[in-house]
Image (cartoon, helix red, strand yellow):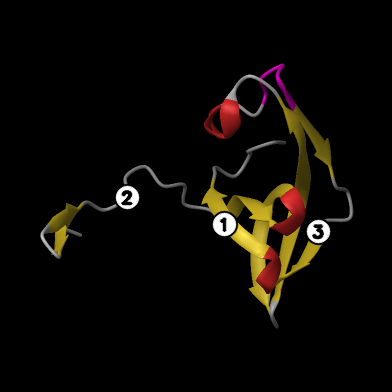
Amino acid sequence: MENVVINGIEYEPVKNRPAGTRAVVVVDRGWIFAGDVTRENGRIRLDRAVWLFRWESVGFDGVIADPKSENVDIRPMPNGVDLPEGAEIFLVPVDDSWGL
């Protein structure tokens, strides 16, 4: 895809976007999970799920870039996560092994 101009602003296509279905999902009330995303019947299912429990001094972008940092606490969710679609605030696509 080539660049697109909307209202005089030029936009470029996203480069290096991960190809899989894994994403970090920020949901209401401050919860942050990651997993392989499936959407069905108004629900969001996360398989191979993890809970982004805590991080310090690296910022959210630092967590996305390096989830294995000693400043990041990620905990497994062995039964996956099932959310109502309306709880999603935003998601960040990540590579297929993020947080595992």
Q: Earlier in the sequence, mark 2 or mark 3?
A: 2
Q: Residue at x 58, y 28 (%)?
A: 59
Q: How far apart, in angstroms, are the residues tagged by discs 2 and 3?
A: 28 Å
Disc 3 vs disc 1: which is toward the camera? 1
- How many numbered callouts? 3
Q: Which residues are magenta?
A: 68-72
Q: Report x, y in % for residue 50.
A: 77, 44
Question: In the rendered image, which residue does mark 1 sit on?
Answer: 90
Question: In the rendered image, which residue does mark 3 sit on?
Answer: 81
**Mark 3: which secondary structure?**
strand
Whether residue 31 is visible here, answered yes or no, is no
Amino acid marked by disc 2: Val
In the image: residue 45, left or right of residue 79: left
Q: Earlier in the sequence, mark 1 or mark 2?
A: 2
Q: Report x, y in % for residue 8.
A: 10, 60
Amino acid marked by disc 1: Phe
Q: Earlier in the sequence, mark 3 or mark 1?
A: 3
**Numbered badge on residue 4:** none
**Numbered badge on residue 14:** 2
Q: How far apart, in angstroms, are the residues tagged by discs 3 and 1?
A: 16 Å
Q: Which quadrant holds the C terminus? A: top right
**Mark 2: which secondary structure?**
loop
Q: Report x, y in % for residue 75.
A: 83, 36
